[in-house]
Amino acid sequence: MMYWLNNLFGKRTNHPDFWKAYQEEFKHTNNQRVVVLDCETTGLTPGEDKILSIGAVALHQNVIYVEDHFSVFLKQKLIKPESIAIHGIVKNKRNTLTSEMEAIKHLLKFLGSSKILGHHIQFDIQMINLALKNMELPKLKNKVEDTDGLYSKFKGVHQPMHKSLDELCDEFNIPKKDRHTALGDAFLTAQVYQRLVVSL
């Protein structure tokens, strides 16, 4: 009866251990670590499209720690030819594929209580939150910041300027290596972030 009521009102009390461990991290938030996150997806329609890969790299006191990184490729039935032309991820790619649940489980462990940063990051957060919802779990608890907003502050503008990651890399003379891979884009965004925080 209680399980039925929990489902009816969208509440779940018997969360798995990995979610409980993630929640525990917020009892001692790490303000010195920022995780730069990027997702490659089958498209740009949340609720319809799926996550194909997640990449992340951490900064400690604004220094990029390459060894502190995360990368995972997900098993997905939905593959769109138009998105393959951008990110190159296909079903039979040689990367090891993992289930969405396992990918999110390991991502939460990597994130801990760190602030999440990304370029146009709200889309990535929405996609991850939808995956969590499919697992009957709450939304991410981390603070989130967007390099697009930071760039606007850098330029003295009070509204988002909607610059692409390519445009920001060009402006700051950052070589666009591994562009349109999740980990590659996370690393590029981390470098953009470094340029911005030094200037603000």
Image (cartoon, grey):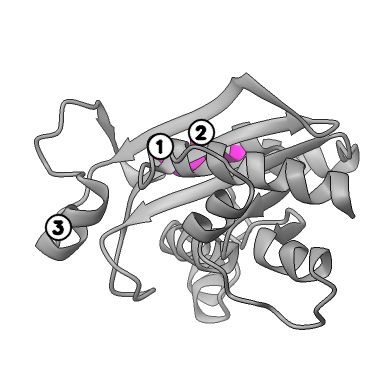
Indicate the position of residue 27 as horizontal and vertical percent values. Answer: 89, 41
Is residue 147 shown in magenta? no
The residue closer to the viewer here, 118 or 29, is 118
The residue that disc 1 covers is 102
Q: Quadrant of residue 96?
A: top left
In the image, is 2 to the left or to the right of 85?
Answer: right
Q: Nearer the viewer, mark 3 or mark 1?
A: 3
Q: Nearer the viewer, mark 3 or mark 2?
A: 3
| SS assignment at label 2 | helix
The residue closer to the viewer here, 106 or 83, is 83
- Disc 3 versus disc 1: distance between alpha carbons? 20 Å
In the image, is 21 to the left or to the right of 84?
Answer: right
The residue that disc 2 covers is 106
In the image, is 123 to the left or to the right of 80?
Answer: right
Indicate the position of residue 91 as horizontal and vertical percent values. Answer: 12, 42
Q: Which residues are magenta?
A: 102-108
- Disc 2 versus disc 1: distance between alpha carbons? 6 Å
Residue 17 visible in the displayed image: no
Question: Residue 79 got which mark?
Answer: 3
**Residue in view at x 23 percent, y 43 percent:** 75
User: Marks 2 and 1: CB-CB under 8 Å?
Assistant: yes
Indicate the position of residue 197 as horizontal and vertical percent values. Answer: 83, 48
The residue closer to the viewer here, 102 or 158, is 158
Which of marks 1 and 3 precedes in the sequence? 3
Residue 56 visible in the displayed image: yes
**Residue in view at x 38 percent, y 36 percent:** 178
